[in-house]
Image: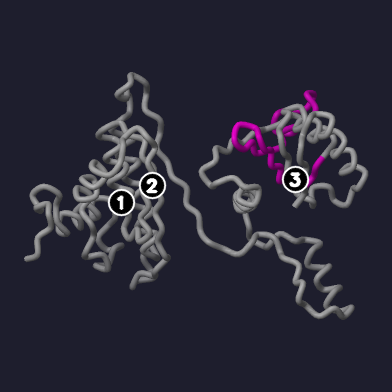
Amino acid sequence: MPQTLWSYSEVGHTQDAKKQLMEHVAFEQTDNVLDTVKPTGLIRRMLQIATHPKEGDIVLDFFAGSGSTGHAVLEQNHADGGNRKCILVQLPEPLPKPENTLKTIADICKERVRRVIKKLNEEDAGKLDLEGAKPRDRGFKVFKLAESNFTPWEAEAPKDAETLARQLDLHVDYIREGRTELDLLYEILLKSGFPLTTPVQKLTLPLTPALSQEERGKIVYSVAGGALLICLERELTMDLIRAMAEKKPERVVCLDAGFAGNDQLKANAVQIFKTKGVTSFKTV
């Protein structure tokens, strides 16, 4: 059998790797499509050599498969108190049995990472980290490539009256059907020049103190410590605009649909944000 520089007794082999996968994802879900899984021991050895535990190194696996690299990064951070980050990229290749709970190889990867995080969090419950503080919870985000959430204007379309009228009708409700608030949030985040890893905090801003929290709460997303506020509310009010302005962000983005054609409200919003030092106010 061909040998690597490291023997299997040091870093494991594919049989070990498959057993590790089975511990986190049921055998019937993998359907024997992943028989050459990389052992986490091998990847951890590479991490020990090529990364620094405390410098926030980013590990990229562009063919993530079952998530062995993510598994290894999590375990190595757990072992040495590191803060390495990883990016896992995997096409949603369908599995042979569509009736399974997990439909694609990407689903296997996500499920494995979730279960590894759950296991490590349970092991850490009640413990202190190497610097004497309680360890933070682990987590990860999943993004899928997709077309824009906003219906684009077709500049190359014919200029006849019928086609123009159809395009105008589409832009009355210009957000694609089935898109969630988070879909819109992260597209605006990217188009505003922020990376996907930028911290985002969900704020509930008051409208009128006399109302209950449920009645008066409107959701606003604070990006990068308040540098950018994104409001995706479909019914903007003067109270909400003033509450956002009081946060004194550098930039504000709102849905144009939130103004519901109220040009006076939009003009007032421009002036209110300007008086609070907001350098950029845009609608999408």
- Residue 220 within the segment the image draws in magenta: yes
Q: How many numbered marks appear?
A: 3
Give me the residue at 79% from left, 34% from top.
240
Give me the residue at 76% from left, 27% from top.
246
- Residue underneath mark 3: 254
- Residue underneath mark 1: 69
Q: Is residue 185 visible?
A: yes
Alpha-carbon neighbours of circle 1 within 10 Å: few (<14), some, or many (≥20)?
many
Q: What is the C-alpha distance between the residues marked 2 and 3?
A: 32 Å
Q: Quadrant of residue 121?
A: top left
Q: Which label is found at residue 210? A: none
Alpha-carbon neighbours of circle 3 within 10 Å: few (<14), some, or many (≥20)?
many
Say which amino acid is labelled 1: Thr
- Among the two numbered marks 1 and 2 on one chain, the one whose residue lies closer to the N terminus: 1
Q: Secondary structure at mark 2?
A: strand
Give me the residue at 77% from left, 61% from top.
173
Q: Quadrant of residue 21?
A: bottom left
- Among the two numbered marks 2 and 3 on one chain, the one whose residue lies closer to the N terminus: 2
| C-beta proximity under 8 Å, tags 1 and 2 | yes
Q: Is residue 158 above or below residue 198?
A: below
- Residue underneath mark 2: 86
Q: Secondary structure at mark 1?
A: helix
Say which amino acid is labelled 2: Cys
